[in-house]
Amino acid sequence: MKITFYAHASFRLAADGLTVITDPYTPGPKGSGFDPINEPADLVIMSSATDSFHSDPSHVLGSPTVINALELPPEGKTVRGLQIRSFPAMESYTWDFGRDPDANALYLFTLGGIRVLHMGDIGNPVLPAHLEALRGNVDLLLALAGAHATIGYDDLDAAIKAIQPRAIIPMHYYSPRGVLNILPVDDFLARYPAESITRVGGPQLELTPGSLPPAMHIYVLEQSR
């Protein structure tokens, strides 16, 4: 599986002749601050349809099938050969958005033989029932690493310990090109041993089931948008 980090919570994952883009943001200075994706995809998966930082597929090229994870049935759904299961969540109950918190979802799918969990925009501890369902069933975790307005670090650490992913790619952290006042990725990385972290030095990473690390390892990608 070839992984490209666009920006914020948006990735491009490609394997088995299928391309998936996660949580596309609204681009430009009036939106997220990030550049448009301007690449094609077969599927776009959004953690909700109401947050412009996670749900604007207008700049994804081609004619992708767009999936709102919140609309999936509890048992999941197969779309274009990809089985997707969602785990409903909420934004932070304590952060002041100037509005009520929005619903969103974590979502799990398998691509290229790798089980991928995207954390959506969850702002609270992952529910115990979700942790139990995910335990041992995630190879790659796309982890919210900016704290403010999303899951706190202590709760994120607890989720990682419970889920036991073999690889983690941080996302949704401070970028000078973005407009959100969230924490930099180094604050998250400081909680883990240096030997468990690889700074890839670019926006892309290739993983296969055979190249997954034997123990939990963090890969830091650079945004490309």
Image (tube, helix red, strand yellow):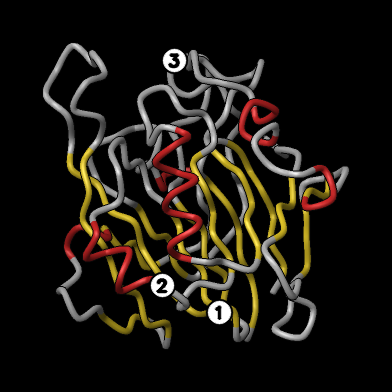
Where residue 169 appears, as percent x and y from the top left, is 64, 52
Residue 32 position (above or below residue 36):
above
Q: Nearer the viewer, mark 2 or mark 3?
A: 2
- Could you say which is closer to the camera, residue 79 or residue 198? 198
Left or right side of 137 for 198: right
> Could you tell me which residue is drawn at 49 percent across and 13 percent down?
181
Q: State the residue position of label 2.
A: 135
Residue 142 position (above or below residue 123):
below
Amino acid bearing label 2: Arg
Secondary structure beneath label 3: loop
Farthest residue in the left direction? 100
> Could you tell me which residue is drawn at 57 percent across and 20 percent down?
178
Residue 191 position (above or below residue 60):
above
Amino acid bearing label 3: Lys
Q: Earlier in the sequence, mark 2 or mark 1?
A: 1
- Could you say which is closer to the camera, residue 126 or residue 87? 126
How far apart are labels 2 and 1 at the CA level? 18 Å
How many C-alpha atoms fall within 10 Å of the one at disc 2: few (<14), some, or many (≥20)?
Answer: some
Q: State the residue position of label 3.
A: 30
Farthest residue in the right direction? 201
> Could you tell me which residue is drawn at 37 percent across and 32 percent down?
150
Where residue 84 appears, as percent x and y from the top left, is 35, 75
How far apart are labels 1 and 3 at the CA level? 33 Å
Q: Nearer the viewer, mark 1 or mark 3?
A: 1
Where residue 154 appears, as percent x and y from the top left, is 44, 36
Secondary structure beneath label 2: loop
User: Where is the C terminus found, in terms of image quarters?
Assistant: top right
Where residue 223 appears, as percent x and y from the top left, is 70, 38
Q: Looking at the image, do the residues carrying marks 2 and 3 touch, with CB atoms under 8 Å apart?
A: no
Q: Which label number is shown at residue 111?
A: 1
